Amino acid sequence: MRSGDLVYLARTRAGLTQAQLGARAGMAQNAVSRIERGEVDASFASVTRLVRACGLEPRISLAAGDASYARDVRRRLALTPLQRLELGVNLAHVAQSTRRAALGNEGVGNRSR
């Protein structure tokens, strides 16, 4: 994962705008934007500062190489751009349905208390 992707995920998870994150981290909004777009390869220290400004703590671990996804990657690369888009939309719908179901189940549990 690119450093900009990590910053973007942390920021959106925290519900912050780029300007809000920049203010929290002592960085200009356009600097946050450049990092997220991959125009700047942010240092580990900068990424850590931005992620922590989102109220999250970055975790880093090492793992042995794993080719278990290679077949799926090859299969998806063989798809046309439209097929990839359709797959992504379908997966987003599944994720949304799963989240709604989980939130619904939490709500039911909270009402009975």
Image (cartoon, helix red, strand yellow):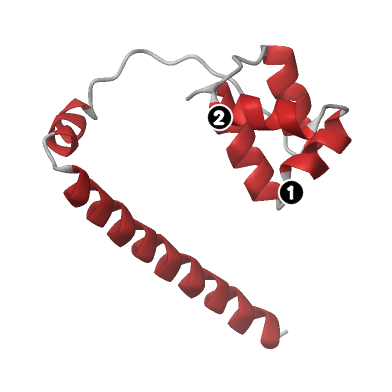
Tell which of 50 and 19 is nearer to you. Answer: 19
Q: Is 21 drawn above or below residue 90 in the view shown?
A: above
Instruction: Describe residue 82's horizontal placement relative to residue 105 as left or right.
Output: left
Label 1 vs 2, first from the N-terminus: 1
Question: Which numbered mark, 1 or 2, is in the foreground of this view?
Answer: 2
Residue ID for mark 2: 37
Residue 63 in percent (x, y) is at 43, 16
The furthest residue to the bottom: 112
Q: Identify which amino acid the numbered label 1 is placed on.
A: Leu
Q: Is 43 drawn above or below residue 23 in the view shown?
A: above
Label 2 environment density (alpha carbons within 10 Å; few <14, some 14–19, many ≥20) = some
Residue 44 in percent (x, y) is at 67, 13
Query: How far separated are the C-alphas under marks 1 and 2?
Result: 16 Å
User: Which residue is at 71% across, 53% downward?
Assistant: 15
Residue 10 in percent (x, y) is at 65, 39
Q: Is 58 drawn above or below residue 102 in the view shown?
A: above
Q: Secondary structure at mark 2?
A: helix
Tell which of 88 and 35 is nearer to you. Answer: 35
Q: Is 33 drawn above or below residue 2 in the view shown?
A: below
Find residue 16 and name its label: 1
Residue 100 in percent (x, y) is at 49, 72
Number of marks drawn: 2
Q: Secondary structure at mark 1?
A: loop
User: Which residue is at 69% across, 22% downward?
Assistant: 47
User: Which residue is at 27% across, 51% downward?
Assistant: 85
Find residue 57 and name its label: none
User: Which residue is at 29% across, 61% downward?
Assistant: 90
The image quadrant of residue 110 is: bottom right
Q: Identify which amino acid the numbered label 2 is placed on.
A: Arg
Label 1 environment density (alpha carbons within 10 Å; few <14, some 14–19, many ≥20) = some
